[in-house]
Image (spheres, rainbow, N blue to C red):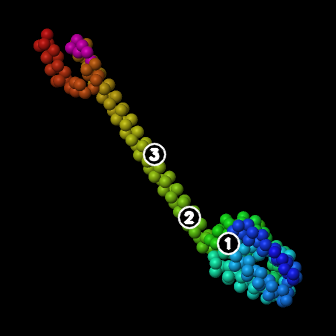
């Protein structure tokens, strides 16, 4: 789209509409620019990219126009993004750089999605400054790190206690095993004299540990065996 006194081009990308202004824009061109810009931003679109890289503004009245357009666009739940990269435009819009969204290109805006979200929560990144955190975010990060460290310490401590309990159980079982072995050895050694006298013919019942638990029971067993014969 073009006009006789001004140069305006429009590219429609579905939800994205890029409007390019170029040429020398003074007071006389202002009414026509206003009409065209308002008409275009009233149309369909979610993101309106106003490319002013090749525009030369001769009056500050265009700043007021763009502020009005920004309010109109926001009222319809859409966004207005200024597109430029040259120093002249940076100087021209410097007064309102914190109000307008300004990017070097439409693709740069699309790629800034994650960085914009981080910036909203207080995380900023710059090539010269590196990663910077706001005080609130820095405190939150420190608290999170401390919390993770405490949780890790508690997990390690709990695992240490569990290992110690397992080791104590193993030691107790080993001690019980040693005691059983000593009792069995003592029981077997105590029947040596009876074996020499021929009283004990089969020690398997004694070695089974628990079937015959004392000498009285064993002698009763022998007596019952003789009676059966």
Point out which mark residue 144 bears: 2
Q: Say whether disc 3 or disc 1 marks the residue closer to the N-terminus.
A: 1
Q: Left or right of 159: which side holds 91?
A: right
> Going 16% across and 24% down the picture, which residue do you hit?
216
Q: Which residues are magenta?
A: 198-203
Q: Is residue 103 visible?
A: no
- Which residue lies under the disc numbered 1? 46
**Is residue 13 visible from the viewing direction of this image?**
yes
Q: CA distance from mark 3 to mark 1?
A: 61 Å
Horizontal placement of 127 versus 116: left or right? right
Q: Nearer the viewer, mark 3 or mark 1?
A: 1
Quarter of image, res 103 = bottom right
Would you say 185 lies left or right of 28 here? left
Q: Nearer the viewer, mark 2 or mark 3?
A: 2
- Say whether disc 1 or disc 2 marks the residue closer to the N-terminus: 1
Q: Is residue 152 above or below residue 57?
A: above
Mark 2 and mark 3 lie on one chain; the one further toward the N terminus is 2
**Quarter holding residue 121:** bottom right
Q: What residue sits 75% from the left and 65% below the top?
A: 107
Residue 81's place in the image compared with 208, above or below, is below
> Which residue does the numbered mark 3 point to in the structure image?
163
**How many numbered callouts?**
3
Residue 207 pos. (x, y %): 29, 22
Magenta span: helix, strand or loop, mainly? loop
Residue 72 vs residue 146, the one in the foreground: 72
Quadrant of the image containing the C terminus = top left
């Amino acid at each position: 789209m073009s006009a006789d006194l001004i140069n305006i081009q429009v590219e429609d990308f579905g939800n994205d509409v890029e409007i390019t202004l170029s040429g020398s824009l003074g007071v006389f061109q202002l009414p026509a620019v206003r009409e065209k810009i308002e008409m275009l931003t009233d149309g369909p679109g979610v993101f309106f990219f106003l490319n002013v890289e090749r525009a030369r503004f001769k009056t500050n009245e265009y700043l007021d126009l763009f502020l009005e357009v920004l309010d109109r666009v926001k009222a319809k739940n859409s966004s207005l993004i200024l597109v430029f990269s040259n120093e002249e435009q940076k100087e021209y819009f410097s007064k309102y750089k914190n109000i307008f969204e300004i990017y070097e290109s439409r693709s740069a805006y699309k790629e800034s999605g994650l960085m914009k979200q981080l910036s909203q929560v207080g995380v900023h990144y710059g090539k010269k400054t590196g990663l910077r955190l706001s005080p609130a975010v820095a405190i939150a990060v420190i608290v999170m790190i401390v919390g993770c460290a405490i949780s890790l310490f508690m997990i390690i401590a709990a695992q240490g206690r569990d290992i110690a309990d397992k080791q104590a159980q193993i030691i107790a079982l080993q001690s019980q095993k040693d005691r059983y072995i000593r009792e069995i050895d003592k029981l077997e050694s105590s029947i040596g004299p009876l074996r020499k006298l021929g009283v004990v013919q089969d020690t398997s019942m004694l070695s089974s540990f628990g079937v015959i638990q004392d000498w009285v029971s064993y002698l009763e067993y022998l007596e019952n065996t003789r009676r059966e014969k």
